[in-house]
Amino acid sequence: MITPTMWFKPHTPVLGDFEQLTMLAVLRLDDEAYGAAIQREIETQAERTISINAVYTTLDRLEGKGLLRSWIGEPTPQRGGRRKKHYAVEPAGMTSIGQAYRAFRRLTRGLERRLERA
Amino acid sequence: VTSHPWGLRLALWLLRRRLAPDRLEFVLGDLEEEYRRRAPHAPAGAVLWLLRQTLDCLFEPPHTAQTASRHLARTRSNSLRYVREAVRSLRTRRPAVAASIAVIAVGVGSATMVAAAAHALLFRALPVPQHERLVTGVALREGVDPYGTSILEYRAFRDRGQSFAAMGLSRQLSSTLRMGGAPLRVRAASVDAGYLSAAGARAAIGRTISADDDRPGAPLVAVVSHGFWSVHLAQSPSILGTPLVLDGRAATIVGVMSNGFELPFAAEVWVPMQLAFDALPLEQQLASAYTFLARLRDDVGVADANREVSAIAAALAREHSQRRGWAYRLLGLRQQLTGDLDGRTTRIVALVVASALFLLVICCINAANLLLLQATERQRDEAVRLAIGASARELALERLAANALIGVSGGVLGVCIAAWVGPALATLNPVRTEAFASTLTAFRVDAAFASVGAVMSLVAIFAIGLVPQLRLGERPAIAAALASSAPRTGVSRAHRTQLRLLVAAQIAVAIVLLVAGGLVLRSFSALRHVDLGFEPRALVTSQLTLPPALTANHAMRSAAIERVLDAARSVPGVTGAAVTTNVPLQRVSIDSFYTVEGAPPGNANDVPITAHRAVTPGYLRMIGVRLLRGRLLRDTDGASAPRVAVDTETLAAQAWPGQDPGGRRVRRGRAGAIAPWLTVVGVVADVKEDRFNFRIDRAAWYMPYAQEDSAAPPNLVVEASGDPSVVARSVGERVRDVDPDLVMSDLVPLDSQVAELLTTERFAAVMLATLALSGLLLATLGLHSATAQIVSAQRAEIALRLAVGASRRRVVQMVVREVALVATAGTAAGTLVAAIAAPNLGAILFEVAPHDATTYASVALLLVGACSAAAWLPALRAARVDPARLLR
């Protein structure tokens, strides 16, 4: 069946709530964005308990959408001699998160005082 | 890196098996890094965090575009997936699942606990080598009345028997032992040379008793138990050769018995018998006063050996006129220890086990019932999944996995409950054993019982799994289920029939349990209210051992007894004190033949027997016997007064049927014996003196202690007005002041000794009542939930009926009819089964018939009450249906 929405498919994928948090954490951590650090960042900044499992699922999905890229880092003793998988935001990812940010900004304009109090 | 805490190691090990290989390294590295970062600040929190992360990863491994298809292929054949799906489906119906688990836990727990008790009582190996080949025996007077073994019989078994590899005799002594300090009362056993080797006794230190030690005139040796050595000799390794004095005879310790050996009578000291059996005069050989123990040859069974000893006993009866009327029976050692002469203990234990299994059956049906109720609600869910391509097989496997999870959880919980509660069961004390109490009544749930519990859980899983699976054949009507917009598709006719059958089955099994419980309870109550003929309350008793210096002759013994009684009476709170040669219902009873003056038996060997009691004058009044005729014994019935006796009514009826026994004469021994004649001065109501024959009345007579030269250890009986245990302590101190060498056992309340007699019956009554009431409760709950669901599914119908003018009374009637139908069917089936099975209980019931109408009627009444309670709420809800709202 052909639906009208098929012709208006956006070029930049819309991010879900948890995907936004993950993208922001990767951005904030810059060079140090890998699984454990991303999880820690979301837990401390967003005050949400999440599983490493969920983080990896999301990272994989975002990488699959072309919003993130990843590379393998050096092994460290704290990790039992295991290597890290680092992530960084791709330009498409920047566009997506930027869109989300702008939408959020616009929608919250004028509501700041009420939202801060809530 | 070197130190890996066990929790981390376990988590990493688990995840290594679960995660996709291309993720593995990074996830494990992240988990370890984060765990190490958290551990120094909050170790417990770090472990919890790790556990949670691990569980998350286990149940939902991270997917990637590359691994997703591979993962899917792997899990398709992975049974864990069914478990995951099952967990998911169970989560959505928590209350029903929790109820099912609890019900199964109750069933498995009680069955496991009872099985543990039965195993300890009937099967657990006794701590002697090849205990199942050890037999003991009783001589049976008139074929039923059990006595000890005589030396005559023992010699015959030894010389003519082929069944035994080894045999021995023992005799229980209640002895005074002195080793320097204060005299001790000990459980001593005199044994012949064969006894200890037949029993398989081994010495931990030194040696046991040899044939040389057992020769008459040999220097006396003694072997002490491991417990005695530990408590009284401080486990001294240089104990061998230590002298001791046992009942005035000097002996030397030659050995310490290995730990745990307790034959016979949990003895603490063993000494040789030193009797030349073959040279003893026949009169002594005839005394049925010994305990026999033999080890069967490997190729001989108990039944074969029993045939042989019966033949030998029959031959002895032909050869010796005094043995006429006696038979002999061998018993397994365990049978003797548990006091199971007539198989009653085994039957009672079997009954309790059967009841626990019945309860398990009820629990399984109940759980199946709960799950069946759930199955209806899942129909729609399953129909949706079938529609989007799930196979019926897949759904069935998932259901099976869900049931297995419930069964396993219930089973584990049940075994835990059993392990926790099981030891408490031992306080119910189903048996009083003479030896090996720690083996026979340790109802611990060990590894073996965890596996019994596992088997029972498996049975439960299949039982509860079977019912929902029966519905597998009927393929859910997908279209119908999906078309229905109601959350519940209603209860189909077939489904309703199945529900009713399940509930009726529960009620039927509960009825069987209730009837058995009711009969046993009534029998126990009858036993408890048996007329003892005496009043045990406020009485405490103790066995005295008088020092040899005070017992040179009977006059001295009587005088010493008087001093003891005076000392006891001087204690504040003591309202009376007396002495008897036998307290009622003691394990060992002194009996005596008797001859009636002017009525010698036609057959010289027809010798009636009476319980023989020499008592001080106040004794009969103090224990509260009921005088029927004449008088009780008086202080004036002294040593020089005319010899008198007080008889029980059974003795009077046996000796002088239909006549007044007052003034008539009777004497000890067989016709022609030279014992003095005793004049009957009074008749008292029957007194339960005989422990084994507690259920019938046996003859007994009482004679003044001063007139009867008796070497039997006297029993002190004290009547106290206050707390008997407080008085007992002062009495003990005061009596010991009479003579420093006088030894007395602890004062024990007489009613506790009477209560002890019924331990097995009490065990049965408590267990059966508990199991039966649990069964009733579960069956009632099952009835309630089924009725509630049927009513709830029929709400539309009820509303319609109300709308077209049916009265609310008719609606309630409809529900009541529903309940009555199911309850009647269940009750009828249960009563029928109970009536058919009940005659098997005949052997353990006392004064209650297996088809006792009162019991059956009470059970029926109880059930009517329970069913009414179960029907009440659903009926009320049905009556409150609002047609206007429901039909809108």
Image (cartoon, coloured by chain):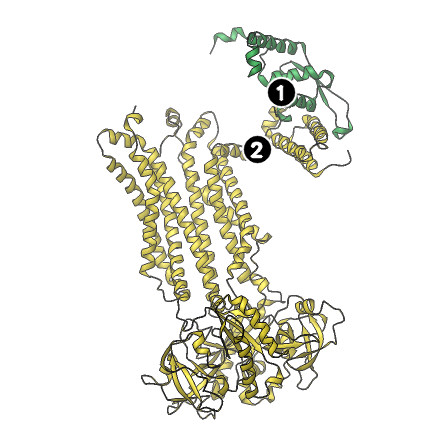
Chain colours: A green, B yellow
Residue B656 position within the rendered picture, expressed as x and y whole percent measured from the top left: 35, 85
Question: Which numbered tag is attached to residue B77?
Answer: 2
Q: Residue A27 or B476: which is nearer the viewer?
A: A27
Residue B129 position within the rendered picture, expressed as x and y whole percent measured from the top left: 63, 67
Letter of the chain that mark 1 sits on in the rendering: A
Q: In this figure, which residue is indicated by the disc labeled 1?
A: A46
Q: Residue at x 41, y 77 (%)?
A: B698
**Residue depth check, mark 1 versus mark 2: number of the one nearer the observer:** 1
Q: Residue B587 or B279: which is nearer the viewer?
A: B587
Q: Residue furthest left?
A: B805
Q: Mark 1 and mark 2 in contact? Answer it, CB < 8 Å.
A: no
Please tell me how crowded label 1 is: few (under 14), some (14-19), or many (20+) other residues with Cα within 10 Å: few
Amino acid at the residue labelled 2? Ser
Q: Can I make out residue B717 in this image?
A: yes
| Res. B261 image quadrant | bottom right
Where is the C terminus of chain B found, in terms of image quarters? top left
Q: Residue at x 42, y 45 (%)?
A: B365
Please tell me how crowded label 2 is: few (under 14), some (14-19), or many (20+) other residues with Cα within 10 Å: few
In the structure shown, which secondary structural element does the residue marked by tag 1 occupy? helix
Residue B247 position within the rendered picture, expressed as x and y whole percent measured from the top left: 64, 80
Where is the N terminus of chain B found, in terms of image quarters? top right
Amino acid at the residue labelled 1? Ala
